[in-house]
Image (tube, grey):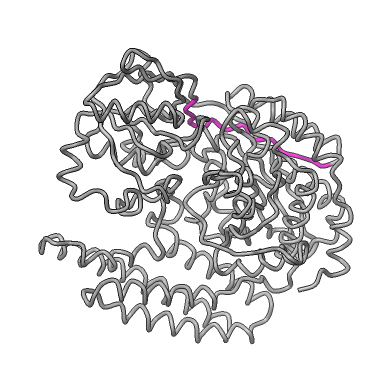
Amino acid sequence: MAVSADEQRFLDEVSLDLPWSLVEEFATTPRWRPEDVNRAADVIAAKLRAAGVPVEVHAPEIYLSIPYSASVSAGGVTYRAKPPSSSLSVPGGRTGKLVTLKANPKALRSYNRDIKTLFGGSIASLAEVRALVGGNIVVMQGFGNPALTSLIEEWGGIGLIAVNPGIDIHWGTCTTIWGSPDLEDMPRKPKIPVVAVNNPDGQKLMALAAEGGEATIRTDLVEGWFAQKIPVVSIPGSVEPEKFVLLHGHYDSWDVGVGDNATGDATLLELSRVLWANRGALRRGVKLAWWPGHSTGRYAGSTWFTDAFALDLDRNCVAQINCDSPGCRWATSYHDTRAFTESAAIATAAILDIVPDAVVRTQRPPQAGDYSFNNIGLPSFFMLSSTMPDELRHEKHYYDVSGCGANIAWHTENDTLEIADRDVLLTDMKIYLLSALRVANAEILPFDWSATCDEFLATIDEYQVASKGLADLSAARAATEGLKSDLAQLDHAAPAQRNAAVMELARVLVPINYTRAPRFRHDPAYTVPKLPTLAVAAELPDFADDHMRRVAQVDLMRGQNRYLAAIAHARRVVGAAD
């Protein structure tokens, strides 16, 4: 797809002047304590108004966990540490015997709660690991993430020391609660202290564990409800003014967080300016939003917005585009681009039209990155932006991280101005702008549900084979083939009816592929497998106990019923649009 003359007029207006001024200001502005976050929101709002862009600033109370300090004392030595957000605060310390678990090195940053993924088969049985972990402090390679923390707590561990891969210690979060908690979420609040240490210190602690030593963890965090500002720019369309694309990213960061996410905040700022100045050329509207509570509230800002404006999002939002860590140094590859299958072609085409020789590969987004809209059912693309080519990352001996264009300054004090790159930022801003325009201005919403059906069919086949004959997913396959065939009917529908059907299909098919919870609730913050209601089919051979296998088959029967009902709903939507 070539850039049209109308699109080029938008792209030609993109400049670094305004966005780079925000990057430079945020490079000296810490943004993780609540009061600092609100001051940063004021900076964003002031720059928008100075550029002539109207902005509304919400100030909801959201639940945050603010980490301040941590340490590990063992063998007469006190080691520097950082507590992930939502770690249990124990300023007086918690002491226990140290034990180790062997992590799968390929899953150090995984959000997957699957034991095989996290531990690579090193755990022989749950009984064995419970006996090892119960009553002890676990020290192991990795990041103190939600999936790992919840498992250690479930197994009876009284603390977790995550040994980060390098010489720096990375901030993070360890709760599976997505956003501010509700009554169902609160029981999942972490009940153990968690800290991260650097690799040299962690090696000493693991050696001490091998000798049967013990350690004392100290953590100091403050939790509570804080009023946090959410700037939102609403740019109306001229043909369908009530419909809109949501383009968003977080502005709270660890320390000054230039690559994660001052560059993203700057991108949203510049796109607001360009889109507002050219609003008369927009078919649909664009909302741009900056979130607090990403780091210290596990996406509490975007989750509040999702909850507060759920019905408007349901009726009118045609897609969400996440903007995190664009414009970082050496980030010239797009081989780790995140997109739902129905949106992948939009993302790929926008990248290639701005960077014709780019390496582009799209992948399923993890349960992360302010994707707080899956339960509503919004087509989605982008999360992390451009990244370092793998060859360069390996040459630099960088381990895998979840932002900053693969720079290992991610979530450390080193994420400073040098992490940003002006040229890469200019390129990424144009990619975000072009992709948003192609959703906002398309006469027919450009989401490929036939490709999603192909994904579903491949997933069903994968689960069927993995079940080794213990599951029968033929009904799910037949229903999906029927939906794919029916989709051709949309080609004959009038544009308004077709677009309404495309949006309604999203409300049905996105949740069935990305969520377990009902619509308008939020799944825990760990990886959801593809077609989660059918995923247990692949696990059936792993149940050695006949009783538990039968229990799992009941689970699968109910899950397949949900899937079949969703596909039947989707087929009715297609039929009604014809």
Instruction: Give residue 76's position: percent from left, percent from top.
Output: 33, 12
Q: Quadrant of residue 441?
A: bottom right
Q: Residue at 45% across / 59% down in the picture?
A: 514
Task: Check the image and name the residue furthest to the front.
Answer: 395
Q: Quadrant of residue 92?
A: top left
Q: Is residue 353 magenta?
A: no
Q: Is residue 107 left or right of residue 575?
A: left
Q: Residue at 43% across / 38% down in the picture?
A: 143
Instruction: Give residue 531's position: percent from left, percent from top.
Output: 40, 66
Q: What stretch of residues is rendered in magenta?
A: 53-66
Q: Residue at 61% across / 71% down in the picture?
A: 447
- In this rendering, the answer to whether 554 lies above or below 189 is below
Residue nearest the viewer, comparing 397 with 344: 397
- In this rendering, the answer to whether 194 lies above or below 507 is above
Q: Residue at 67% across / 74% down in the picture?
A: 496
Instruction: Give residue 395's position: percent from left, percent from top.
Output: 60, 48
Task: Check the image and name the residue furthest to the left.
Answer: 546
Q: Is residue 54 magenta?
A: yes
- In this rendering, the answer to whether 343 lies above or below 320 is below
Residue nearest the viewer, comparing 362 with 237: 362
Q: Quadrant of residue 134?
A: top left
Q: Is residue 450 left or right of residue 194?
A: right
Q: Is residue 519 left or right of residue 259?
A: left
Instruction: Give residue 6's position: percent from left, percent from top.
Output: 87, 66
| Image quadrant where one finds the C terminus | bottom right
Q: How many marks?
A: 0
Q: Main secondary structure of the magenta part?
A: strand
| Image quadrant where one finds the N terminus | bottom right
